[in-house]
Every structure is written in structure tokens, then in C-alpha cells.
Image (cartoon, rainbow, N blue to C red):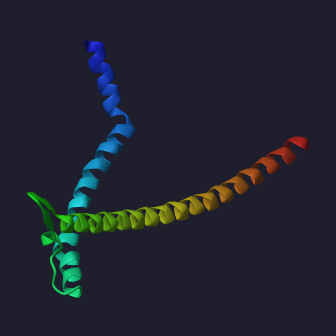
């Protein structure tokens, strides 16, 4: 049992698991913000543009069943906006990451040049 607990602690302490947990929590909170944006700002504006209709109330009744296709439309718009936001954030982070890597390469290149100069200087001293 002690070995199991030890392995479990090692598993939980791994960076990937912690990163994933943080991502899930932040993603959930981000989803709530975007859902609120869609439900409280975007969908009412879309409703005004198309004549004051509220998508959530759109439905059709067939027999005893009610198909609430308006909620489905709202969920599709919600998904598209969330996907757009995530795409935009990832694209921005990718540009920042690429910019940092380019800066690091420039710094590394200068360091490499300096080290080469030192190496060449040492080689000439040992030949004399």
C-alpha cells in the first residue's frame, strides 16, 4: 500500500499532470466567461439584428415532444466563439514564443561567436 501511495504521489507531482489540471480549471473558467459573453451580449445583439427574436425560445412541437432548436443554435454560436477565442490566444502565444526563440537564437549566436574567438585565441597561443 505504501508503494502505491508513493507511486501515486510521483504521478501527481509530474509536470504534465499539474499542467493539465491547471489547463482544465482555466479552460472551464474561460468557457464560463465566453458563455456569458454569448448569452448576455452577442445573442441579444444578433436577435435585434434579425428582428428581436430570442434564439432560446425557438422550438417546434411534434406530438408530445418539443424540439428546442434555438438552444442548439445558441450552443453552436457559443462553440464557434469559444473556438475563435482559443485560436486567437494560441496564435498570439505562438507568435510570442516564436519571437522569444528568435531572440534566444540571436543571443546564442553572439555567445557562440565569442566562444569561437576565445577558442581560436587559445589555439594560436598553444601553437606558439
Q: Where residue 8 sits in the image (x, y, percent)?
A: 30, 24
- Residue 57 vs residue 86: left or right? left
- Residue 53 vs residue 102: left or right? left
Count of number-bearing discs: 0
Quarter where residue 35 is shown: bottom left
Instruction: Give above or below for 21 relative to 13.
Output: below
Q: Is residue 86 or residue 81 the one in the foreground?
A: 81
* Quadrant where the C terminus is found in the figure: top right
Residue farthest along the right direction in this orientation = 128
Q: Residue at x 24, y 54 (%)?
A: 28
Residue farthest along the left direction in this orientation = 64
Instruction: Give above or below for 36 relative to 27.
Output: below
Q: Residue at x 15, y 69 (%)?
A: 56
Q: Where residue 18 sits in the image (x, y, percent)?
A: 32, 40
Quarter where residue 74 is shown: bottom left
Residue farthest along the front direction in this orientation = 63
Q: Residue at x 32, y 49 (%)?
A: 23
Q: Where residue 85 sits in the image (x, y, percent)?
A: 35, 67
Q: Is residue 59 or residue 81 the one in the foreground?
A: 59
* Quadrant where the N terminus is found in the figure: top left
Q: Where residue 116 sits in the image (x, y, percent)?
A: 76, 51
Q: Residue at x 44, y 67 (%)?
A: 92
Quarter where residue 51 is shown: bottom left
Amino acid at each position: 500500500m505504501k508503494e502505491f501511495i508513493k507511486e501515486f504521489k510521483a504521478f501527481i507531482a509530474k509536470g504534465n499532470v499539474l499542467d493539465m489540471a491547471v489547463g482544465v480549471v482555466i479552460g472551464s473558467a474561460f468557457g464560463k466567461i465566453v458563455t456569458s459573453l454569448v448569452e448576455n451580449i452577442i445573442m441579444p445583439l444578433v436577435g435585434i439584428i434579425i428582428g428581436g427574436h430570442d434564439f432560446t425560445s425557438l422550438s417546434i412541437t411534434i406530438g408530445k415532444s418539443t424540439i428546442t432548436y434555438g438552444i442548439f443554435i445558441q450552443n453552436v454560436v457559443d462553440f464557434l466563439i469559444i473556438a475563435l477565442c482559443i485560436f486567437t490566444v494560441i496564435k498570439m502565444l505562438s507568435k510570442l514564443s516564436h519571437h522569444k526563440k528568435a531572440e534566444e537564437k540571436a543571443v546564442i549566436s553572439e555567445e557562440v561567436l565569442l566562444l569561437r574567438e576565445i577558442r581560436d585565441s587559445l589555439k594560436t597561443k598553444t601553437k606558439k
